[in-house]
Image (tube, helix red, strand yellow):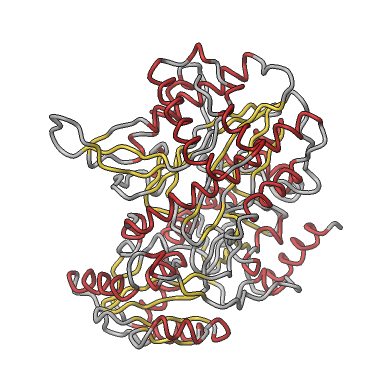
């Protein structure tokens, strides 16, 4: 019996012992985080799946794994199809599948600290049709059989200086207090780690690729707050930074604090707080009011200091990525560069400046057919060599104390010219990227209303891509930050209805993927800014492009570009040259000059 089969077998024995007929295993933690610490990687341990979004459902005689379009190929490579049936979201869901597959009268377990309340309600409703029940467990049965499960990180929480934050923690707490007072609320539970980091101006090292500290906060209407955090993480500098208005408690004190809220009106965000928080407050006799976490929108709207920091981080990052692309243009056509070696080299260029804190996500380094796997994660087993005359896609980002970056470039590895089909597809993606970059839109426009700007040239050729066009980005925080996004509104995806507001940062990343052949994506970060239009009736907005790195001219079919698209290209590359050339020298600068020459 191989490893994952043995683990599944052990879990089934544990479920029988616990009197359960099934169990649901998401990728999640107590904070509903996108990226979770090693201690919470239960799905990866059980199934082998390494993506950042997915769920497994284990019954006595069958099991299924649910992933969206980004992971269709990856799940088949990593998860044994004899053990788990592959299920595609949103075509189906754990709720729908359990509604069809759960035995009559079954008890299906779930960990209330890993799921949101809306999820619990939808699954309970689907099960009730079969006379089955969804049962919260006292302790997670996966943890019971995961013998060498890592402990949660005890890295110290770090102070995020006001020179980078642009606003003091006390001002931020005062704004939350005002929000509570307006709604006649006593307190708000802040459980999303990036909200806590932003509100208190703290960062940490508990989650790979995102500078967060594991903790919970109760913020009160008098402007004070309670922080629940492991004592090992608390330093004298942190205590001094937080001051008297923030009371520090052991993380273990969070549930007792919720239980002491009888008669209080408490705001809790159903999208960001786990079901267990609602259940604890309800049992305690508190009145829970379901409202969006009041930190979410202010965090998304960057202040002037954060904008300046982001521009500085982008310029620094752009120089590092350009040095990498120059190196790649010399080395890759010789045929000796692997995906892993390229990713390592790119990280090394970023690290040379001495200011890199971490990557903002695991680099997607996809040669040829691996580039067609949208959220491909390179490993020793899958790493391909970048072959001459092929397409290479690299999507990467960095965490600097003044900003978070995310950029994708698709390059042609020579020496021959790219085939006509590849140039056509690349140019259609480029035209969509430019259309979104140049978009002007009235106040009140949501990201979903701009999504087709980026897809139109692919659609006209009967093509599309199975991911969103843009996500929000934090300020030395999460590389995927809500509430704003640019995506199809189908399926009620979170964030697609959020109106875009000045100060929000988003990615602009249309793509095209030919399974088994190649992938194309062009990604820059953009900042929403007001647009002055003579005679405008009302407020209008557009985008400032923040990312400046050459786009591969070898892949462009210039004949397909309209004059205004060519103008955008030339203006963008002139700006890129002006911004980056002072940071580069010698052959790197020479490469940049030719890469930025007008079309």
Residue 81 in view, yes or no = no
Residue that extends furthest to the front in the rendered view of this protein: 586
Q: Residue at x 17, y 70 (%)?
A: 182
Residue that extends furthest to the right in the rendered view of this protein: 1
Q: Is residue 376 above or below residue 359?
A: above
Left or right: residue 104 compared with residue 402: right
Q: Residue 184's x, y, as percent?
A: 18, 74
Left or right: residue 441 compared with residue 60: left
Q: Residue 586's x, y, as percent?
A: 65, 38
Q: Is residue 62 above or below residue 370?
A: below
Residue that extends furthest to the top in the rendered view of this protein: 559
Q: Nearer the viewer, residue 206 or 151?
A: 206
Q: Residue 596's x, y, as percent?
A: 53, 28
Where does the N terminus fall, quadrant-wise?
A: bottom right
Residue 104 in view, yes or no = yes
Q: How many marks?
A: 0
Left or right: residue 261 compared with residue 369: left
Q: Residue 447's x, y, as percent?
A: 35, 40
Q: Nearer the viewer, residue 92 or 421?
A: 421
Q: Quadrant of residue 581?
A: top right
Left or right: residue 137 compared with residue 339: left
Q: Residue at x 43, y 43 (%)?
A: 546
Q: Is residue 402 above or below residue 182?
A: above
């Amino acid at each position: 019996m191989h490893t994952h089969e043995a683990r599944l077998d052990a879990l089934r024995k544990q479920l029988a012992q616990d009197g359960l007929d099934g169990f649901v295993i998401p990728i999640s933690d107590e904070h509903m985080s996108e990226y979770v610490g090693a201690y919470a990687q239960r799905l990866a341990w059980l199934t082998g799946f390494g993506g950042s979004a997915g769920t497994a459902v284990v019954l006595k005689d069958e099991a299924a794994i649910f992933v969206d379009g980004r992971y269709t190929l990856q799940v088949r490579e990593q998860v044994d199809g004899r053990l788990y049936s592959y299920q595609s979201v949103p075509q189906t869901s754990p709720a729908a599948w359990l509604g069809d597959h759960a035995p009559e009268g079954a008890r299906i377990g779930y960990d209330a600290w890993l799921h949101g309340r809306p999820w619990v309600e939808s699954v309970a409703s689907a099960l009730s049709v079969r006379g089955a029940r969804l049962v919260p467990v006292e302790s997670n049965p996966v943890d019971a059989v995961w013998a060498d499960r890592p402990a949660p990180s005890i890295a110290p929480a770090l102070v995020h200086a006001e020179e980078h934050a642009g606003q003091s923690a006390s001002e931020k707490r005062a704004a939350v207090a005002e929000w509570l007072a307006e709604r006649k609320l006593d307190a708000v539970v802040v459980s999303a780690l990036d909200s806590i980091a932003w509100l208190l101006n703290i960062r940490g090292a508990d989650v790979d690729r995102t500078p967060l500290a594991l903790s919970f906060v109760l913020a009160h209407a008098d402007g004070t707050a309670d922080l629940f955090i492991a004592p090992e993480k608390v330093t004298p500098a942190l205590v001094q930074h937080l001051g008297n208005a923030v009371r520090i408690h052991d993380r273990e004190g969070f549930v007792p604090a919720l239980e002491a809220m009888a008669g209080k009106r408490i705001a809790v965000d159903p999208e960001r707080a786990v079901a267990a928080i609602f259940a604890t407050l309800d049992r305690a006799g508190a009145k829970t009011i379901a409202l969006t976490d009041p930190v979410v929108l202010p965090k998304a709207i960057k202040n002037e200091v954060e904008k300046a920091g982001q521009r500085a981080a982008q310029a620094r990052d752009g120089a590092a990525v350009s040095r990498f692309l120059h190196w790649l243009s010399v080395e890759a056509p010789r045929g000796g560069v692997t995906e892993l070696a390229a990713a390592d080299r790119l990280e090394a260029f970023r690290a040379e400046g001495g200011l890199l804190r971490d990557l903002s996500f695991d680099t997607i380094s996809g040669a040829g057919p691996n580039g067609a796997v949208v959220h491909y994660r390179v490993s020793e087993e899958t790493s391909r060599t970048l072959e001459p005359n092929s397409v290479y896609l690299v999507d990467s980002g960095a965490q600097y104390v003044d900003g978070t970056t995310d950029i994708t470039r698709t390059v042609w590895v020579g020496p021959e010219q790219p085939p006509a089909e590849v140039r056509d597809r690349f140019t259609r993606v480029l035209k969509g990227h430019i259309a979104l970059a140049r978009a002007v839109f009235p106040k009140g426009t949501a990201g979903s209303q701009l999504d087709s700007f980026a897809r139109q040239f692919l659609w006209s050729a009967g093509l599309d891509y199975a991911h969103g066009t843009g996500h929000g980005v934090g300020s030395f925080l999460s590389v995927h930050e809500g509430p704003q996004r640019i995506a199809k509104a189908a399926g009620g995806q979170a964030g697609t209805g959020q109106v875009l507001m000045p100060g929000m940062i988003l990615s602009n990343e249309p793509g095209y993927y030919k399974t088994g052949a190649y992938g194309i994506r062009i990604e820059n970060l953009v900042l929403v800014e007001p647009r002055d239009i003579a005679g405008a009736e009302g407020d209008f907005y557009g985008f400032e492009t923040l990312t400046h790195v050459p786009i591969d001219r070898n892949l462009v079919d210039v004949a397909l570009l309209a004059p205004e698209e060519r103008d955008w290209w030339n203006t963008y590359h002139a700006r890129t040259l002006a911004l980056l050339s002072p940071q580069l020298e010698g052959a790197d600068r020479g490469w940049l000059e030719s890469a930025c020459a007008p079309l």
